[in-house]
Image (cartoon, rainbow, N blue to C red):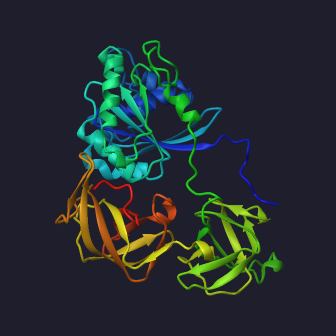
């Protein structure tokens, strides 16, 4: 029988908070956890009895996510803070990401796996440069859902007119960013209005509070059975267990399905070699199964003894991914040493690592203005750019918008082993600001 997820368990939503400095991201997350009763008793006690009480007797909710000492001393978010909580309707993994421009790379990290982004906007200041930057990054990363949380509405007397002005300002953003379907919620993270419960101060707002929206928004699957079959091979499984003589001749290829569904008898093709075979058996941690869907981890036993190793990719012969030794990609540069065109790096793409050269730097994206500087001299830390790569062997990939696992990669400096860039393959450049 097929191993299926527990249908009684609430589904999972991954989301991140972003926006400009001091717009209240960490306070919003703290309020969300505090008011939804998602904290342990000792966490509540620490908050209520710590020295971080404000003059008004309110706990400093930002300290729930700003865990580093430097963050508490400076009152800013530096690193990505992950928190896990659940309601009866849904489970959540949230990432509180920094607002400062110098920590843009941390925001990219937190948003790279998000299914929804909450962009906070200070009702007094509107869409600042950094707010626009984070909206542009969310668009570049193809985050499926966007919530614009208009915070500090209490400081503008809960003005419906001001809220409408910010909606109009957002509507004027370039249409090709794909942000038109954003959900707007007026709130006060400090006071708790429209975070978990509806606020009496916004009778003019007909939408739900933030938590209710998070509980009911459609969760987009990163990859599923309707997508083309993809299995990056992580290792070849030869157990040789003396206590299980029936496994003496067992040989399977193991990995996590990055897309599609697999069944016994299904034809597969191995990339880059091109060999073909059929699936004889499918094994999971629960034993043999009749089928498996992404993103399950599986071991496939093939009908033929093929030369397959870590880093190979199994696909359906009729739905192969793109293949190129000179793919185009968008990069977020993560390292203090600028990008060097022509320098050799290592490209880590799913389980495969190979030498790569950045052969050309064709553009640098300025998310704050949604414009592209053509042929820039370099990419500095936190810059977003468009590049062409040249790899030792062809890369088999899907566009990032279609498959994050097969469309994402990192670059590694071979001398220091430091991760210097995070990248997204985009074969036709669709959806990027020009």
Q: Quadrant of residue 373?
A: bottom left
The answer to whether residue 107 is seen in the rendering is no
Q: Is residue 145 left or right of residue 175?
A: right
Q: How far from the left and from the top, in percent, is residue 365?
A: 26, 55
Query: Where does the C terminus fall, quadrant-wise?
Result: bottom left
In depth, the one of 201 and 62 nearer the eye is 201
Above or below — where is 106 with respect to 270? Answer: above
Q: Tell me what residue is drawn at x 62 percent, y 57 percent.
A: 224
The answer to whether residue 203 is seen in the rendering is yes
Above or below — where is 302 with respect to 105? Answer: below
Query: Where does the N terminus fall, quadrant-wise?
Result: bottom right
- Counting every numbered tag in the picture gives 0
Q: How far from the left and from the top, in percent, is residue 281?
A: 76, 73
Q: Residue furthest left?
A: 377
Q: How far from the left and from the top, in percent, is residue 313?
A: 56, 75
Q: Quadrant of residue 409?
A: bottom left
Q: Tell me what residue is drawn at x 76 percent, y 61 percent.
A: 286
Above or below — where is 138 with respect to 74? Answer: below
In depth, the one of 149 and 398 nearer the eye is 398
Above or below — where is 290 with respect to 146? Answer: below
Q: How far from the left and from the top, in percent, is residue 256?
A: 61, 65
């Amino acid at each position: 029988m097929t191993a299926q997820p527990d249908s009684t368990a609430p589904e999972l939503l991954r989301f991140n908070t972003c926006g400009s400095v001091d717009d209240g991201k960490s306070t919003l997350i703290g309020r969300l956890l505090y008011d939804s009763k998602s904290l342990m008793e000792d966490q509540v006690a620490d908050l209520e009895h710590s020295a971080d009480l404000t003059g008004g007797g309110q706990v400093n909710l930002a300290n729930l996510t700003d865990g580093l000492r430097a963050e508490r001393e400076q009152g800013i978010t530096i690193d990505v803070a992950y928190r896990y909580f659940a309601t009866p309707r849904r489970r959540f993994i949230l990432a509180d990401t920094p607002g400062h421009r110098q920590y843009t790379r941390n925001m990219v990290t937190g948003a790279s796996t998000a299914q929804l982004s909450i962009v906070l906007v200070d009702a007094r200041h509107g869409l600042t440069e950094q707010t626009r930057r984070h909206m542009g990054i969310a668009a570049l990363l193809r985050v499926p859902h966007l919530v614009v949380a208009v915070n500090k509405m209490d400081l503008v007397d809960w003005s419906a007119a001001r809220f409408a002005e910010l909606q109009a300002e957002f509507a004027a953003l370039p249409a090709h960013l794909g942000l038109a379907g954003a959900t707007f919620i007026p709130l006060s993270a400090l006071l708790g209005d429209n975070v978990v419960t509806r606020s009496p101060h916004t009778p003019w707002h007909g939408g739900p509070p933030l938590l209710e929206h998070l509980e009911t928004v459609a969760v987009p699957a990163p990859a599923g059975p309707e997508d083309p079959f993809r299995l990056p091979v992580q290792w070849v499984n030869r157990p040789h267990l003396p206590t299980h003589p029936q496994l003496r001749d067992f040989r399977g290829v193991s990995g996590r399905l990055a897309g599609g569904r697999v069944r016994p008898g299904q034809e597969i093709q191995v990339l880059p070699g091109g060999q073909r075979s059929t699936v004889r058996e499918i094994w999971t941690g629960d034993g043999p199964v009749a089928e498996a869907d992404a993103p399950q981890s599986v071991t496939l036993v093939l009908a033929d003894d093929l030369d397959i190793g870590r880093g190979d990719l199994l696909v359906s012969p009729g739905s192969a991914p793109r293949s190129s030794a000179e793919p185009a990609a968008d990069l977020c540069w993560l390292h203090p040493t600028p990008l060097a065109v022509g320098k050799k790096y290592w490209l880590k793409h799913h389980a495969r690592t190979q030498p790569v050269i950045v052969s050309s730097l064709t553009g640098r994206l300025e998310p704050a203005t949604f414009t592209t500087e053509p042929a820039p001299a370099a990419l500095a830390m936190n810059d977003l750019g468009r590049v062409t790569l040249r790899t030792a062997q062809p890369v088999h990939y899907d566009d990032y918008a279609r498959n994050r696992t097969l469309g994402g990669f990192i670059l590694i400096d071979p001398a220091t082993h430091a991760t210097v860039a995070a990248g997204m393959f985009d074969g036709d450049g669709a959806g990027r600001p020009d």
